[in-house]
Image (cartoon, rainbow, N blue to C red):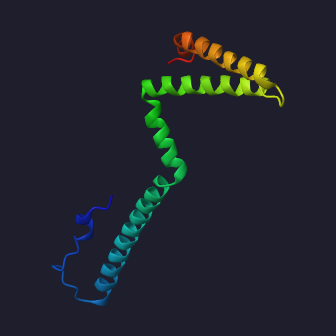
Amino acid sequence: MINTADMMDITVETRITNSTELKYKIQQLQAKLYQQEERIKHTVKEIHYSFHLSNLVKSAVHNLNEDPEFKGNALEAALNFGGQFLLDKIMFRKGTGIKGYLVNAGLKKLLSAVISGKKDSILKRFGF
């Protein structure tokens, strides 16, 4: 952060009596200005970096990752999605008719029951 006290400590109390003292004071002020500019540049870069989309997403994921309830719900949703995807890949064929539809629906119900029945053991395996 920029300290405003550092910016305002220019004193007028010293009397400059010759050109050497003036040049010295100018160099001091230029050095102070350079330091302040560098601090501002650094602060602006930090702010800019913190607003990158990837950093915002990382921060949000990190915050959500700390919530154990979210972890459990996310894993359950992933398992259900994975099971659904697998069934769709296995069973989806053109022209399966009503039998194929009923078998697919039955397998989905069975898979859902198996996943929800073993949810605790699956969560423990993943460390949740």
Residue 88 screen position, x and y as percent: 73, 27
| Image position of 59 (left or right of 82) | left
27 sits left or right of 126 in the view: left
Within the image, what quadrant is residue 85 found in?
Answer: top right
Q: Is residue 34 above or below residue 102?
A: below
Q: Image check: 54 left or right of 86?
A: left
Q: Residue furthest left?
A: 13
Q: Position of residue 65 (x, y in %)?
A: 47, 31
**Observer-nearest of 89 and 18:** 89
Identify whether 114 is placed above or below 48.
Answer: above
Q: Position of residue 74 (x, y in %)?
A: 53, 28
Residue drawn 77% across the image and 19% down it: 99
Query: Where is 89 relative to 123, above or below?
Result: below
The image quadrant that residue 28 belongs to is bottom left
Lateral position of residue 93 relative to residue 71, left or right:
right
> Quarter of the image containing the N terminus?
bottom left
Q: Splitting the image into 4 quarters, where does residue 84 fall?
A: top right
Question: Hey, which residue is sitting farthest front in the picture?
Answer: 98
Camera-side residue: 115 or 40?
115
Q: Residue at x 67, y 22 (%)?
A: 83
Write the residue at 73% across / 17% down. Answer: 103
Q: Residue shown at 32%/76% (left/top)?
A: 29
Q: Position of residue 93 (x, y in %)?
A: 82, 28
